[in-house]
Amino acid sequence: MARISESKARNGASRRAFLKAGLAGGAMVAAGAAVTRPNPAQAAGDPLITETQDWNRYLGDGVDASPYGSPSQFESHVVRRNVSWLTADPVSSINFTPLHELDGIITPNGVCFERHHAGTAVIDPVEHRLMINGLVETPLVFTMDDLKRFPRENRVYFLECAANSGMEWRGAQLNGCQFTHGMVHCVAYTGVPLKLLLEEAGLKPEGKWLLAEGADASAMTRSIPIEKALDDCMVAFKMNGEALRPEQGYPVRLVVPGWEGNMWVKWLRRLEVGDQPWAQREETSKYTDLHADGTARRHTFVMDVKSVITNPSPQAPVTHGRGQMVLSGIAWSGHGRIKRVDVSLDGGRNWHEARIDGPSLPKALHRFYYDFDWDGSELFLQSRAVDETGQVQPTKDELRAVRGVNSIYHNNGIQTWYVKADGGVENVEVS
């Protein structure tokens, strides 16, 4: 088990022993603790209120100075980040969403996590084509203008990489919500239901699988059951109202709601209908779950019920001191809507129902809050989501009991943040 800090490691105290001692000590918030409120007397004498500031005195820039709007200069730290030792080369990299800096359920386009295998393809939409071939009555080739003449839909979905939280299988490693859980985002997609395009081509009865292929240099390909393709998949060309970003597959990508992100093929160029899965590289050497006995689970498409507390977290420590605290997080499930989220302040000994706020949409992020008074005691924060099918988010130990520690993909185990008395936060595990 990893240690809670280097200093404690040098002293020979294990993280497990430390956490058990902390929980036994009853780390908890005090009932009825004083709530920190703004002081009207202080506010009345605050020079930032009573004295004229530069922004009160001078005219600002006109809107035309920035024809495409940008975040405030004071939010320049809200960006995607990578982990250097996970990046073999910049053209095959992962960049994580800053979950701890966001609120609500929609991820801004500029900070949506992205994974690429051969860099970002730069494609002129006028020259892009989408082909449907294989076991169809009429093979077809669509231009972007052709696609936009079909009836379109707007749907909000999360996209999660199957490897999200994968580095945590053997124990707490990455000290930040952005790095442990940041391979997920949620946007509103605009596009054409895939079933309309397949119906236009005419599916043959023996067509049972679909091969989706990307136009980038890696020719990224995945096999998809035809039932899913005809259910809720989309061929999308917009996200959050604007054209797809280049790193998100511009000019067109596949949307496979609730299923692992690797199947959401970007820069989509071809859809081949076949009678069996293709067993491509990304579904044999990767995106399988390796068991302790050497066997592997294949075709584990659905992303199961999951949640994480985004604030407080290692990159978002408590800076306001004791008193009123707003705990916030996100929950999601590939099986549908989130029905309930529970929060624990003491490492899973006691649970409290959180408040889900904002839209509750199937296969989308849900935002939850828990408001309480903090007395400065140590906290062991956890969240546990339950979806509308009754599935409950498991602990990491429950997952390891089934799959061992060799797996990388589909880790939806409960995350623990240790909040210290000084407000600092660390990634830990309790058992």
Image (cartoon, rainbow, N blue to C red):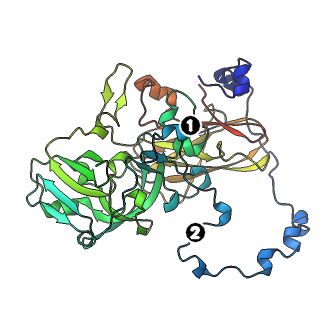
In the image, what residue type sits under mark 1?
Answer: Gln
Report the side of 261 relative to 329 (left or right): left
Q: CA distance from mark 1 to mark 2?
A: 33 Å
From this view, report whether residue 48 is shown above or below residue 265. below
Residue 127: mark: none
The structure residue drawn at horizontal position 11% and vertical position 51%, both measured from the top left corner, is: 135
Q: Nearer the viewer, mark 1 or mark 2?
A: 2
Report the side of 265 relative to 133 (left or right): right
In the image, what residue type sits under mark 2?
Answer: Ser
Report the side of 39 relative to 30 (left or right): right
Percent of width and height locating residue 376: 79, 40
Whether residue 355 is visible: no
Q: Earlier along the polypeptide chain: callout 1 or callout 2?
A: 2
Percent of width and height locating residue 278: 20, 41
Contact (Cβ within 8 Å) of mark 1 with mark 2 = no
Q: Which residue is mark 2?
A: 70
Q: Quadrant of residue 342?
A: top right
Q: Quadrant of residue 78?
A: bottom right
Viewer-proximal residue, 387 or 87? Answer: 87
Q: Residues within 10 Å of mark 2 (few under 14, many from 20)?
A: few
Q: Which residue is mark 1?
A: 415
Label 2: element kind: loop
Query: Which quadrant: the C terminus?
Result: top right
Query: Which quadrant: the N terminus?
Result: top right
Label 1: element kind: loop
Report the side of 275 relative to 421 (left or right): left
Whether residue 316 is visible: yes
Percent of width and height locating residue 352: 62, 42
The structure residue drawn at horizontal position 32% and vertical position 27%, both measured from the top left corner, is: 296
